[in-house]
Amino acid sequence: MEAKKIEIKNSRDVVTARKMGRKMALELGFGSADQTRLATAISELTRNVVQYAGTGLCTITDQSNKNEIKIVTAVEDAGPGISDIDKALEQGYSSGGGMGAGLPGAKRLVQEFGIDSVPGNTVVTITLRRKKI
Amino acid sequence: MKIPVLRLKNILLTSIQVDLTDEDALNFQEDLLKAVQINDADGVIIDITALDVVDSFLARVLNETAVMAKILGAEAVISGMQPDVALTLVEMGRELIGVSTAINLDHGMEKLQALISKRAGGV
Ligand SMILES: Nc1ncnc2c1ncn2[C@@H]1O[C@H](COP(=O)(O)OP(=O)(O)OP(=O)(O)O)[C@@H](O)[C@H]1O
Ligand SMILES: [Mg+2]
């Protein structure tokens, strides 16, 4: 099980993280649309870390098994947390003058999406998976 | 990371060839809008053939750039968006693509000329 860890401190790291995600998706045999979906979702989540928490960690893990190819990406930070997760997932809700498209958009790009958040610890986990043919 | 802006008669032409950080994107926006003003351009084309990720932030910057260009008197067209990028943006939310687009530079130029003449004919 291969895992890549990228420390997220600034917008350069956002670019690095999404490139890593795309690379792993390509290597595991995901199609180009899925590669783009994963890279874009990682970009959204890691940018949120820079914007709302300052620093964090992005861990991209190959969890493929004999039936499917699967990448689990966890993006975590020790920032203020997301107090109202339902609201944060609403299309158009932003506390930072953004479009409020990041979280709801990322959610639509992947097969599984979860947020665990308390003040001091936020983890957003996304899973990209496809049946092996 | 400076993105060159070329002038072709009354039109400005730019091509984003590298993966932009957020700061790069904002600098690009500023440079392009300055160039619109200095050259009194009638239109701008931003070619993004080389971009394999356009997330909500860059989408917003591109949309805003088009709006601001318009305020400065120039039409704007984005050309060359990769199909996977278009697909991803639409999946994330249709409103993310808020600017005139064209499949390639050639069509982008035609579309831009049409927008410019329409504006000149002004209703
Ligand atoms: N890691 C985080 N820590 C704390 N709050 C967060 C975090 N991620 C998201 N949020 C909160 O959730 C809201 C929605 O996030 P989302 O990414 O959808 O939109 P945005 O970042 O405001 O705008 P956009 O992503 O479109 O530029 C944010 O405005 C912020 O309040
Ligand atoms: Mg965001």
Image: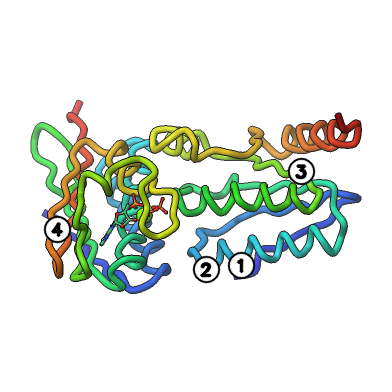
Identify the mark at residue B75; answer none if there is no mark. 3
> What amino acid is found at the position of numbered circle 1 in the picture?
Asn
| Location of residue B24 with respect to A99 vertically, above or below | below
Q: Is mark 3 within 8 Å of ligand 1?
A: no
> What amino acid is found at the position of numbered circle 4 in the picture?
Ser
Q: Secondary structure at mark 1?
A: helix
Identify the mark at residue B27; answer none if there is no mark. 1
Residue holding disc 4 = A117
Q: Secondary structure at mark 3?
A: strand
Classed neighbour count for the residue bearing mark 1: other residues with Cα under 10 Å, few (<14), some (14–19), many (≥20): some
Classed neighbour count for the residue bearing mark 2: other residues with Cα under 10 Å, few (<14), some (14–19), many (≥20): few
CA–CA distance between discs 1 and 3? Answer: 20 Å
Q: Is mark 4 within 8 Å of ligand 1?
A: yes
Q: Is residue B62 left or right of residue A23?
A: right
Q: Residue at x 79, y 48 (%)?
A: B74
Q: Chain of mark 1?
A: B
Q: Is mark 2 within 8 Å of ligand 1?
A: no
Camera sees residue A30: no
Q: Residue at x 64, y 36 (%)?
A: B101
CA–CA distance between discs 4 and 2? Answer: 28 Å
Q: Earlier in the sequence, mark 1 or mark 3?
A: 1
Q: Quadrant of residue A36?
A: top left
CA–CA distance between discs 4 and 3? Answer: 44 Å
Q: Is residue A100 left or right of residue B105?
A: left
Q: Residue at x 76, y 48 (%)?
A: B44
